[in-house]
């Protein structure tokens, strides 16, 4: 909140300074979409010392440098509220897949997984220098593993207190909130009360609760209700991550899950959602395995795989899951990255089973899944799951409180067969759903990518084109902006976004990354403590 009081003072100082010398940069002749959802307008944007200092008619002689934005939309930089950049950003600090898609800020630490030491993580990013701004949640799974490892039980009072202490420290170190991955181990082992108490800790420091909810298929409504319950009991704003309906028998039920969110808002609970605009999800292969079979560490998991009685029980639950989802095999599950044998990348479990000459049954495919995990020494195998309907994607996109997020890390060009969302999430909304299918208007789409995320995660000087705000700005051609990445050919950068500025520095100029790394670490309100 302190930043909000500083903004008027900062703006006054910048204005005085700007009068004494030309602006660092002026963007002229563009159609400004300011992030509020208001209609576009013709205006020039002046930048000084990394901030916007004036919007209006500005003389060319008042600028050290001019960008001619004729024919282009000038918008706030996009804020990706659901990313996973730990490790991948350090490997590629220029974050090209995000930058070329217009993303200037990412929120990482989602789905319950984050750096366990945010102070050190933030320091490392500052020292390295990165092209995007970064904020982070503290992950519940990370905290639980640090205290309880992979124990399949409720925490003792001491363990609960230790987890709360870790969350409190993370909030003081600058976390923007708490995340959970209640569909993943060990988060799936946690009862609601455990999460509520951790969320209360985050709430005391002005944090948000972001959740990959416990179920996105047959029990999705109960899982949404659990997130709402946590909001109610912890008195914390809630962001439901990658909102979806991921089971064929309940396709079309997004109207009902959206109504649950709306009912919570009518009650006075601050609940919002985000989504990626695709009909396939992406997560690990182990998500197909019953969570109880993944408890207590690698040796215990392998012992279960090798015990014929237990293996049969695991397989029976996997096959029952297929039946409940009206599927006869695992054709819907496609390998994105399998380092043990990269020839499997891009192939479904069914296709791999056929390639290996195994019996063509779902039961054999279930065995194959366990075999692949064992051959990979239980290390993460990234998958793509084709489980959603276009109708639900569009229903959720129409909902005014839906933000846009990629659920991606920094993609390595040419490596594996990642989900195309890593490259083209925002462009896909602007091209497919705004321009081509007219699902939502342009100004509304930009609001979902900018000011709504900034409001949700309390980024005081981001998400709008306003004097005094950080100069995170994107210039694109609304007629040509397009995602190029597909499931078959995922390694393709967005086209049509010709300029990207981060904190006033041009990171993309005329469609080319400059290599600049002006990104900042964005701290949560708790850092003031």
Image: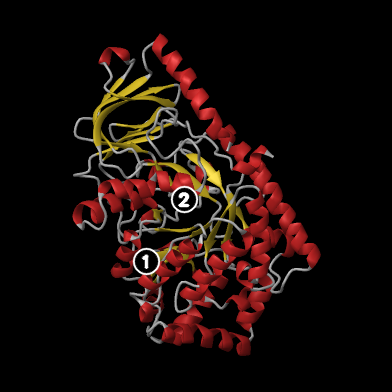
Looking at the rendered image, the quarter that the N terminus falls into is top right
In the picture, the disc for residue 525 is: none
Left or right placement of residue 185 versus residue 7 in this view = right
Please report the residue visible at 50 percent of the width from the left and 41 percent of the height from the top: 459
Q: Secondary structure at mark 2?
A: loop
Residue 117 visible somewhere in the drawing = no
The vertical placement of 162 against 521, above or below, is below
How many neighbours does mark 1 have within 10 angstroms: few (below 14), some (14-19), or many (20 or more)? many
Q: Could you tell me residue 94's position as x and y percent?
A: 45, 38
Q: Earlier in the sequence, mark 1 or mark 2?
A: 2
Q: Could you tell me residue 241's position as x and y percent?
A: 47, 60
Q: Give the labeled residue for mark 2.
A: 81
Please state which of residues 300 and 106 is positioned toward the viewer in this rendering. 106
Please report the residue visible at 65 percent of the width from the left and 64 percent of the height from the top: 196
Inter-mark Cα distance, 1 to 2:
19 Å
Q: Give the labeled residue for mark 1.
A: 280
Please state which of residues 287 and 355 is positioned toward the viewer in this rendering. 287
């Amino acid at each position: 909140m302190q930043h909000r009081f500083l903004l008027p003072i900062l703006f006054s100082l910048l204005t005085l300074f700007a009068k004494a010398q030309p602006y660092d940069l002026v963007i002229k002749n563009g159609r400004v979409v300011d992030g509020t959802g208001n209609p576009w307008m013709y205006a020039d944007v002046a930048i000084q010392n990394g901030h916007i200092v004036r919007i209006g008619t500005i003389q060319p002689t008042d600028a050290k440098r001019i960008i001619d934005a004729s024919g282009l939309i000038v918008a706030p930089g996009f804020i990706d509220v659901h990313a996973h950049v730990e490790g991948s950003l350090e490997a590629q600090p220029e974050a090209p897949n995000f930058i070329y898609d217009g993303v200037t800020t990412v929120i990482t630490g989602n789905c319950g997984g984050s750096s366990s030491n945010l102070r050190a993580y933030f320091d490392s990013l500052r020292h390295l220098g990165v092209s995007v701004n970064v904020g982070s949640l503290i992950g519940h799974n990370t905290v639980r593993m640090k205290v309880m490892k992979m124990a399949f039980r409720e925490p003792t009072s001491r363990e609960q207190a230790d987890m709360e202490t870790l969350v409190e420290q993370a909030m003081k170190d600058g976390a923007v909130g708490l995340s959970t991955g209640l569909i993943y181990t060990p988060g799936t082992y946690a009862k609601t009360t455990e999460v509520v108490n951790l969320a209360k800790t985050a709430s005391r420091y002005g944090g948000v609760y972001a959740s990959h909810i416990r179920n996105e298929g047959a029990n999705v409504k109960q899982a949404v209700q659990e997130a709402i319950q946590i909001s109610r009991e912890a008195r914390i704003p809630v962001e439901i991550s990658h909102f979806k309906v991921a089971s064929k028998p309940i396709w079309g039920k997004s109207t009902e899950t959206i109504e649950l969110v709306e009912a919570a808002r009518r009650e006075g609970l601050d609940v919002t959602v985000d989504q990626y605009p695709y009909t396939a999800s992406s997560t690990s292969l182990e998500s197909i395995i019953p969570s109880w079979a993944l408890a207590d560490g690698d040796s215990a998991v392998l012992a279960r795989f090798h015990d014929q009685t237990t293996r049969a029980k695991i397989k029976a639950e996997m096959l029952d899951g297929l039946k409940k989802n009206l599927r006869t095999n695992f054709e819907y599950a496609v390998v994105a990255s399998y380092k043990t044998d990269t020839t499997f990348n891009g192939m479904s479990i069914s296709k791999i089973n056929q390639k290996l000459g195994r019996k063509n049954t779902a039961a054999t495919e279930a065995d194959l899944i366990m075999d692949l995990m064992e051959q990979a020494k239980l290390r993460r195998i990234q998958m793509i799951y084709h489980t959603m309907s276009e109708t639900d994607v569009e229903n959720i996109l129409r909902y005014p409180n839906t933000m846009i997020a990629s659920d991606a890390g920094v993609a390595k060009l040419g490596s594996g067969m990642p989900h195309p969302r890593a490259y083209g999430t925002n462009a896909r909304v602007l091209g497919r759903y705004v321009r081509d299918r007219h699902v939502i208007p342009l100004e509304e789409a930009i609001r979902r990518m900018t000011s709504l995320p900034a409001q949700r995660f309390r980024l005081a000087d981001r998400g709008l084109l306003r004097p005094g705000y950080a100069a995170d700005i994107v210039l694109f051609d609304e007629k040509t902006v397009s995602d190029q990445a597909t499931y078959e050919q995922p390694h393709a950068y967005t086209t049509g976004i010709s300029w990207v500025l981060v904190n006033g520095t041009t990171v993309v100029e005329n469609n080319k990354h400059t290599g600049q790394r002006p990104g900042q670490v964005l701290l949560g309100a708790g850092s003031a403590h």
